[in-house]
Amino acid sequence: MYFLLAIVMFITAIFFLYHLHIKLKIDYKKTNNSDIIILIISMVFGIIKYRIELPFLDFVKRMNNFAIRYRIRFKSSNEMRNQLKFRRAERMSEFFSKFDDLIDCYYINKNTISYFSKKTHINNFSLNASLGFDDAYITGISCGVLYVVVINFLAFLKRDINLQIQYIKFEPVFNKEVFDLKLNCIIDIKLGHIIIGIKKLIKTSRGSEISGATYPGSYENNYGKY
């Protein structure tokens, strides 16, 4: 009886963890006087919550020094150790080099990225921007162009990502230099989907090692640049 109860509790716990939602709320606000980003990570119906609030430039600096170290052991007893570094480009040539590496990384992990994009939900996406220049004509043209670019970019994302748009608003401010921006969204994904995605990533790494495939700036060199 106790053994059966333990099995039921174990299955229930696994089911609960698999369907456990992890949410990341992003609030970004830029005005002439402030530039703040707020990140709130929550799970278990908001009981577990972690909040980060700091100026956006400080956030970029912290990400610039952020690294994830990982180790993958293959069935062939070989082992791969590396780290993911997030470092912004200081020069234009470095930016294009990073862009090429990102394309290589995308093609190597295309299936895993596709899986994550299908399982990730971006809810309550809202964008409110005020833009103005001394020249009213330039202000009107700039607002129109930015609106079209943003709308088309989001439409492109919606082909592969579950994106729920709440509202998008661009407000022109004439005869005054202004750039205010408010962006809000909630990124939602299940813990089980994260685990499966990581398994797919490891499987891709094993497949590359078994087949002997080589890629420009692959796992051993590519990620070390970020």
Image: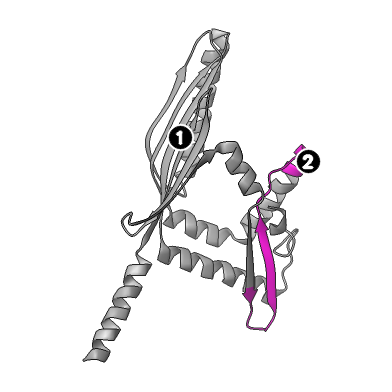
The quadrant of the rendering that contains the N terminus is bottom left
Residue pictured at 51% horizontal, 25% vertical: 31
Residue under label 1:
183
Q: Amino acid at mark 1?
A: Leu
User: In the rendered structure, does residue 93 fall within the stretch colored magenta?
Assistant: yes
- 217 to the left or right of 191: right
- 78 to the left or right of 198: right
Residue pictured at 61% horizontal, 42% vertical: 60
* Residue 10 drawn at (x, y percent): 32, 80
Residue pictured at 54% horizontal, 62% vertical: 112
Q: Circle 2 sits in a helix, a strand or a loop, which is it?
A: helix
* Residue 43 drawn at (x, y percent): 37, 57
- 155 to the left or right of 3: right
Q: Identify whether 196 is placed above or below 159.
A: below
User: In the rendered structure, does residue 111 fall within the stretch colored magenta?
Assistant: no
Q: Circle 1 sits in a helix, a strand or a loop, which is it?
A: strand
Image: magenta residue range? 72-95
* Residue 101 drawn at (x, y percent): 70, 52
Residue under label 2:
93
Residue pictured at 58% horizontal, 70% vertical: 202
- Comparing labels 2 and 1, the label whose residue is closer to the camera: 1
In space, the residues marked 2 and 1 are separated at their CA atoms by: 30 Å
